[in-house]
């Protein structure tokens, strides 16, 4: 068990399960145990009729700074990668109920790509979306190489995923990565209200509509696996290890 991920059932949003990043001292960087907890929550949502929507939230000023760099470094030094990250990505891509997310502030790495699997995302106007995969000598993950070009076109996807350009909330909205921009004070309430509204809809009709719009799960899972192969190889590269060590030394 970990308190770095909180699973909440807010009174204000019946039938909504909140999955909250809660490691603010480390900018909500995600460890293996945190991935495992999120996977468990997504699987619970699949089977629990009292949960109709899951909502990802972070803490004030920070959604997530992405994968924990110490975990990256441990693997680069010869440790085991574990199945937690891949399990989570698969659970995300195969979630059977709608996913929403609310972002306030930093959304880095998987903190950005996670929204490509969400159905509706609201972000505060001070949010920043960025994926420094290539700068770390890594490759994009979470099927983002498939989904991002589809939703925003090659050039913007390349700017985000390969060039490592930061997108403001407004740019992310224009690119179709998120749905709406609001104020930091409103983002959480608006996300929960949206989730509650979805949760009040006829679940089967909503599920069918969602499934039809999301396209081939097989293709997405295939891309996750392909990216993961490259990711694991790159994690072991000298360049990547140098980048992680530089971060840890700061
Ligand atoms: N993994 C592990 N720890 C992280 C982290 C990460 N991804 N991101 C931030 N932290 C930790 C820092 O090490 C620091 O810990 P410390 O106080 O014990 O030294 C703490 O969170 C605060 O981070 P700090 O860098 O001091 O805050 P900042 O506001 O100056 O910068 C970021 C915030 C997110 C821009 C910066 O921390 C960063 O670039 N993080 C790495 C993001 C990243 O590359 N993620 C991987 C994507 S694939």
Image: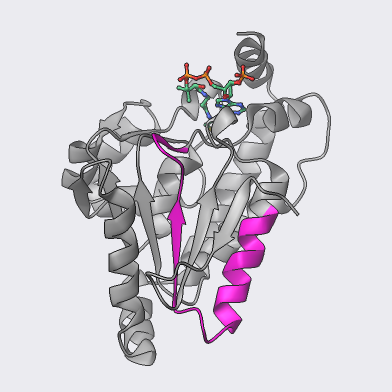
Residue 191 visible in the snapshot: yes
Residue at image position (39%, 30%) is 162
Q: How many marks?
A: 0
Residue 152: x and y in percent read 24, 47
Quadrant in which residue 25 is drawn: top right
Task: Please identify the residue farthest to the front as the structure is shown.
Answer: 11
Up-down relation of residue 154 to residue 20 (above or below): above
Residue 45 is inside the magenta segment = yes
Q: Nearer the viewer, residue 94 or 150?
A: 94
Residue 145 is inside the magenta segment = no
Residue at image position (66%, 9%) is 249
Up-down relation of residue 89 to residue 174 (above or below): below
Task: Please identify the residue farthest to the right as the structure is shown.
Answer: 79
Residue at image position (45%, 56%) is 56
Residue at image position (60%, 83%) is 47
Left or right of residue 237, residue 158 in this image: left
Residue range in magenta is 36-63
Residue 2: x and y in percent read 71, 50
Left or right of residue 201, residue 139 in this image: right
Residue 236: x and y in percent read 72, 27
Up-down relation of residue 149 to residue 125 (above or below): below
Residue 150: x and y in percent read 29, 54
Q: Nearer the viewer, residue 65 or 165?
A: 65
């Amino acid at each position: 068990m970990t308190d770095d991920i909180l699973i909440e059932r807010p009174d204000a949003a019946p039938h909504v399960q909140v999955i909250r990043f809660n490691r603010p001292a480390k900018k909500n960087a995600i460890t293996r145990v945190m991935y495992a907890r999120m996977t468990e929550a997504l699987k619970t949502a699949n089977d629990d009729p009292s949960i109709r929507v899951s909502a990802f939230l972070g803490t004030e000023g920070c959604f997530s700074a992405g994968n924990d760099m110490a975990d990256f470094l441990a693997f680069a030094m010869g440790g085991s990668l574990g199945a937690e990250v891949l399990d989570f990505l698969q659970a995300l891509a195969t979630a059977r109920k709608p996913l929403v997310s609310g972002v306030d502030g930093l959304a880095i790495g998987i903190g950005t790509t996670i929204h490509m699997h969400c159905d509706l995302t609201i972000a505060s106007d001070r949010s920043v979306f960025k994926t420094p995969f290539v700068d770390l000598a890594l490759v994009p993950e979470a099927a983002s190489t498939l989904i991002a070009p589809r939703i925003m076109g090659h050039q913007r996807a390349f700017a985000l995923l390969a060039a490592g350009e930061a997108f403001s909330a407004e740019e992310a909205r224009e690119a179709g990565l998120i749905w709406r921009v609001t104020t930091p004070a409103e983002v959480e309430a608006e996300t929960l209200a949206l989730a509650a509204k979805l949760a009040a809809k006829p679940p089967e009709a909503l599920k069918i509509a969602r499934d039809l719009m999301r396209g081939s799960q097989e293709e997405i899972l295939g891309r996750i696996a392909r990216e993961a192969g490259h990711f694991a190889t790159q994690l072991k590269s000298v360049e990547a290890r140098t980048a992680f060590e530089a971060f840890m030394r700061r």
